[in-house]
Amino acid sequence: MIQLRDYQSAAVARVEERIAAGKRHVVLVAPTAAGKTVMASKLISSAVADGKSVVVIAHRKELLDQTVDKLARFGVEAGVIMGTDKRWNDQRPVQVCSIQTLARRLERRPRASLVIVDECHRATASSYRKVLETWPDAVVIGLTATPWPSQRRGLAELFEDMVLVATPAELIQLGALVEYDAYAYDAPELHKVRITAGDFNQRDLGIACNTKVLVGSVVREYLAHAKGRRAIVFPVNIEHSKALIEEFVPAGVRAAHVDGTTPKAERERILASFSEGSITVVASVACLSEGFDAPAAEVCILARPTKSLTLHLQMIGRILRPSPETGKVRALIHDHAGNLLRLGLPDDQRDYSLDSTPKRLRELLTCPLCMAVLPTINRDGTCSKCSGLIAQPQDQCRVCGKFKSKFVAAEDRCTCPVAESEGSGQKRVVEGRRINLDEIKQLRLNGVRSDLSDRQVVRAAHASVDEKKAEYVRLLQVCKRKHFKRGFADREFQRAFGHWPQFSAASLLGIAPAKRPFFPLPPRWERSA
C-alpha cells in the first residue's frame, strides 16, 4: 500500500471538496514527478469503495501500465481496454482504457460515474471530446503537469475548476524534486525553420539539427561534464537520434536508441538496462517525454528545439525525480536547442490558470486602469502611467538591492554584471565553454530575440559600445528610408541586445552605420526584404 505524502493528501482532499461542492469537471495540476498517478489511484480507490464505476483514459501503453500497477498497490484490480490486450475484463469496476480504442468502440464503452483523463492537456482534441460526451453525467477529473494545451486555447472550455498540487519550486524545497544545474550551448539556426501547428516543422528541424558540429557538441559536452551519469537525450527525429548514438558509442559510452517502432521486447530490455545502469545514455524519439519513470536518470540533453512549453517541461521533468538508492541529489540540464532561453527554467513562476495561454499572459501584463500593455512598474507594483496596482513588488537583487524585472523603471532596475551573482551558491558553476544558469536567467530577463541561437545571444551580451552604436545608426537609417517612427529602431535594438539604446545625439556624431545587420534579420523582415 502506498503512503501518500502530506501535499498529496491535501491535494486529494481539495479535489474531493470541489466535487462535493458540485463541480463536475476538475483538473488536478501536479508537476512531473509529483505523483499524479498515486493521487488519482487514491481518488479511484475511494470511488470504488463507494460502489462507483470508474474509467481511466490515457493515450499510451506505458501510462496505462503505470496506472494498473499503482491501482494494484491500492488493492484495486482493473480491466484494460486497449486493442487486443489480454487483461480485458469488463466485470471489474475500474477500466483503464486507451483513448484510441475507446474512440473506435463508442457503442461498447464501459459504464462510468467517474472518468479520469491522464495528460488532460490533450483533451481539447476531437477524439477526447467525442469520448467524454458519451458520459454527460459523470464527474471528470483531468490530470496534467502542464495545463497549456496550445498557443490559442486553455483548458477552461473543458474544465470548470482546478487544484494545483504544488509548483516545481515548492516541490524542490520539499525535497520531492531534486535541485538542478542548467547550461545552454550553441543552438542551431532556426530563423528559416517553418512553423507547423504551433511548433517547429519536424523536417526542417531534422535538417537544422543533424549536423556533424551539433552532434559532436552534444557528445563532447556530455563527456566533458557528465561522463558516467545516466542521461536521456531528446533528439529531433529517428535519423538524428541514431546519428547521436553513432557518436556516443565510439566515444566509449554505452548508449542506445528507442522510438515508437522499436519492438516491445527490445525497448523493455533497453529501458531495464538503463534503469540498472548497464546502459548510460538513452536517446528517445517521442517515447520518454511523458509517463516514463527513471529516478536514476540525472542528465537531460535537449537536442530538440521546441516552441511547446508543455513538451519542454515534460522532457526536463524526466530527470527531476529523487533517487536515494543511487545517491542522486542533483540533476543536470544540457540545452543544445535554445529551449531554456526560449521557454524558461522548470521552476520559473508560471500562470497555472485554466485560461492560461500566451494571449492570457499578455492580459496579465496589461494595466486594468489605463490598458497600457507591458507598462513600466514602479517599486510598489503600480503602473508608472496611471499608478494603478498591477503587480506585486518585483524581486530584489541581493547585490545592489534594486529590482530585476525588465518592466521596472530604469532608475530602479538592477544592472549588476551576471558574474557577480555566480557566487550565490544556489547553482554550481562547471567550467566549460557554455552559458551557465545565472546567465540564462539574465539574458531571458532582458528579452532578447527568441529566434537567436545561444552563440548569437552571447555575442550580443559581449558586444562593444562602438558595435552597438553602429548598429543603432544603421537602424535609424532604416527608419528614415522606410518612413518608420524612431520607436522601430529602439525596439529592434532592444530585441537584439537586451536593453534599450541610451545614446545621446552627440555620442552618435561621426559613427558610421553598420554595413550589415548585427544579426540576421528577424523572420518577418527576412520574408519582406
Image (cartoon, helix red, strand yellow):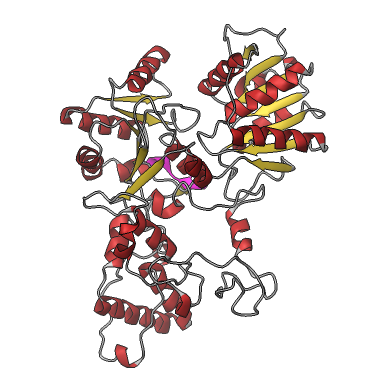
Residue that appears at 41% across and 84% down: 480
Q: Position of residue 325 (x, y in %)?
A: 37, 24
Q: Position of residue 394 (x, y in %)?
A: 53, 66
Q: Quadrant of residue 288?
A: top left
**Near-viewer residue (223 or 453):** 223
> Compared with residue 355, is residue 363 higher up or lower down, i.e. above or below?
below
Residue that appears at 28% across and 20% down: 278
Residue that appears at 64% across and 68% down: 390
Q: Which residues are magenta?
A: 196-203
478 to the left or right of 127: left
Q: Quadrant of residue 477?
A: bottom left
In which quadrant of the rendered image does the C terminus lie?
bottom left
User: What is the count of numbered marks?
Assistant: 0
In which quadrant of the rendered image does the N terminus lie?
top right
Q: Quadrant of residue 103?
A: top right
**Near-viewer residue (41 or 421):** 421
